Image (cartoon, helix red, strand yellow):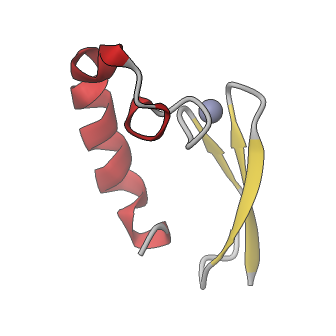
Amino acid sequence: MKIFFNCICKEKFFLFSSYKNNLNINICNNCHPYYTKKKNFSDNSEKIKKFNKKYEKFFK
Ligand SMILES: [Zn+2]
């Protein structure tokens, strides 16, 4: 099953998952400091933690 993620930064992407619904997310690999390697990584560490916890099952 292909699911679509719609991020608040306007980025859209999809993943294959057993999950059946599309998701609206607050952060993605386009605006995620972990992926973009921005220097404000630490400022967003709590946000990333929450994000990873919430969506980790989709990113295995
Ligand atoms: Zn994004």
Quadrant (top left, top right, bottom left, bottom right) of the N terminus: bottom right
For the point 40% across and 71% down, the residue is: 57
User: In the figure, 49 relative to 18: above or below?
Assistant: above
User: In the figure, 43 relative to 15: above or below?
Assistant: above
Residue 17: give x, y in percent of width and height: 61, 80
Quadrant (top left, top right, bottom left, bottom right) of the C terminus: bottom left
Residue 42: give x, y in percent of width and height: 21, 20
**Side (left or right) of 42 relative to 18:** left
User: In the figure, 56 relative to 41: above or below?
Assistant: below
Q: Nearer the viewer, residue 50 or 41?
A: 41
Residue 9: give x, y in percent of width and height: 69, 25
For the point 73% across and 68% down, the residue is: 3
- Tally of numbered discs: 0
**Side (left or right) of 28 relative to 55:** right
User: In the figure, 29 relative to 15: above or below?
Assistant: above
Quarter of the image holding residue 22? bottom right
Residue 18: give x, y in percent of width and height: 60, 85
- Quarter of the displayed picture in which ligand 1 can be seen: top right
For the point 29% across and 23% down, the residue is: 41
**Side (left or right) of 44 relative to 59:** left
For the point 38% across and 38% down, the residue is: 34
Q: Nearer the viewer, residue 42 or 19?
A: 42
